[in-house]
Amino acid sequence: MSSATPTRTPTATTRLARRLPLAGVLRLGRPSDIWFKPALSVVASVAPPNLLLLSLGRLDLAVYTMAGSLCALYAHNRPYAARARALAWVVLGMLSGLALSLLTASLTRNAVVLVTVGALMAAAQKALCDATRIGPPGNVVLTFISSASLFVPQTLGQIPAHMGLAAAAAAWAWLVGMAPGLLRPHGPERRATAQALNAAAAYAATRGTGDGHARARAAAAAAVQAAWQALLSTGARSEPRRALERLLVRAEVALAAPADTDPGRLRAWARDLCGSGPIPHAGRTGAATEELLGVDAELTAGHRPWWRRLGPLAPIALRTALGCALAGYASLALGVGRPYWALVTAASLYQVNLTLTWRRGVQRVVGNLIGVLAFAAVAPLAHANGLALVLCCVALNFGAEALIGRNYWLGTICVTPMALLITEFTGAHPTGELITERALDTVVGALVGFVAAVAVTNRRAGDRIEHALAAVDRCRERAARLLAEERPATAALESARRDLAAALVELRATAEAASGEWWQRALPQERVVLTERTAHRTLAATVRRQGPHTPADTGSTADTGSTADTGSTTEDVRP
């Protein structure tokens, strides 16, 4: 008999425990570069309708105008042409959810039925928002409006007028969202390009071999890809947009030759873009020609429809439906009069994997519990008169958007009292009762929602990695074939490079999402690293092949090595 201590295989429970940390969950980050835009937009969208209703003595109708006004929170990172379409879809989604809620509320007062309908709508909103990538704030605002409306007393005859109020407020919100385009029509594209340049500069500062270079490279590739998506969504290629395209090519060149790139120049261009001056001139290299061959071809090429992304989202949608329904039922069983609070809490938890869902749950509970204390402090002032109530809601709207970018829990400190004050539009309620029920619903919704996330495993996460790996291999092989040609077509090489860059970004996002799941087979981490390494080499070779770069631009054109090399390098590319 051997006396050696047997090696213990970690159980699913211990693996799950290791993936659910508390350290850093509440750590504050840097605010978004454009935090003030949604904050000011929601103020401009919410205040006029509510003040008008206050002057008419019908502040009880503000619950309907708020539905339309909150559409102003969306699409601030999109170019204005794309923003117009995105906001229109948000308005349509908001009004559709509201109409279904009001219709259901007018037909039944059975709380179990209402919770069930709310849970199904929450799952549909989650899946659609994730598939169309319409966020932030994603599905949570839509779910809050539709779920709360289920529990507002309603008759069939009242629905047209109430929907009219919501539609009018939504139209105003659309105008508020589009108004900044009159002053700075290329602002979103400039910001996206500046972010790409800064990310490329951060990677160039590592010289391609320093500490954290693999993570910096992945972040830079994602930022460049996001900037291209912003530019390619704008339609007509104006001269300012062509200038931004040339700067983006410089960021791509930095990814290909980090050791020969001056990070300071990239950061200087990024600073100029964030200002109000003219777009900086990047000069012209072989890779940044006047026409930027391949961009026009990509604009006319077909793109994958958003509904093709619904399939992989099925586990997340199931988690949302089950978690929201059980949270609402549990709230009803405890005798809480507003079970939609528990439903919305559960809906707000679900992220791309279980680890991030856990983090969001902790943040939600902490923020809401502090938020109910904030409500206790604000309530006496808000109850003074209608004007004070409206102004408090507006101020909390601004505070929520100003703080939520630092950390989710910080923003919910303002969101929670704002949501409680919205219930006061129809009449004052005992403060102690609201605080108790909201705190109870928060804890119940978070606990039940997370249990549902654990129960519904996302076994498709591993399959998605396999699909993403295969997509990268296909794109890399296509680019390698073109590189092997003596005179590859410039447009074809450009298209292959873009496809490979997009596939790499998708692979990294898929791998990170899958790594936070549990109860699944071992992930092919080594294969992911190997695929990323060879694909990035091929990507660098395509950039260099497009033309020579002078030392003033990027430095020398060092040999990229064989694009078929499968890892004979000491480069550490662990994610």
Image (cartoon, rainbow, N blue to C red):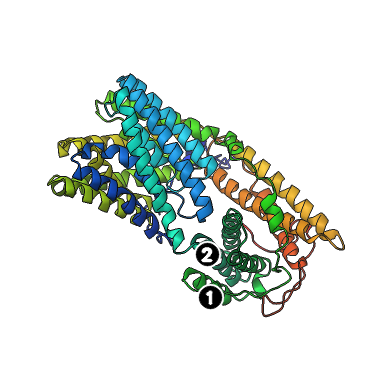
Q: Distance of mark 2 from mark 1, alpha carbons?
A: 13 Å
Task: Spot the residue most to the bottom.
Answer: 552
Q: Residue at x 32, y 19 (%)?
A: 108
Foreground mark, 2 or 1, reads 2
Q: Quadrant of the N terminus?
A: top right
Q: Name the spot of residue 328 as percent of width and height, x first.
A: 34, 28
Q: Can you tell which mark lies on residue 268?
A: 1
Q: Amino acid at mark 1?
A: Ala
What SS does tag 2 mark?
Answer: helix
According to the picture, the residue beneath numbered tag 2 turns out to be 190
Q: Name the spot of residue 512 as percent of width and height, x first.
A: 56, 48
Q: Residue at x 37, y 28 (%)?
A: 101
Q: Mark 2, residues whose alpha carbon is within 10 Å: few (<14), some, or many (≥20)?
A: many
Q: Residue at x 38, y 57 (%)?
A: 406
Residue 357 picture quarter: top left
Residue 372 picture quarter: top left
Q: Quadrant of the C terminus?
A: bottom right
Residue 265 sits above or below residue 317 on the image: below
Residue 489 sits above or below residue 161 on the image: below
- Whether pointer 2 and pointer 1 mark residues with C-beta atoms closer than 8 Å, the reply is no
Q: Name the spot of residue 222 as percent of width and height, x first.
A: 58, 57
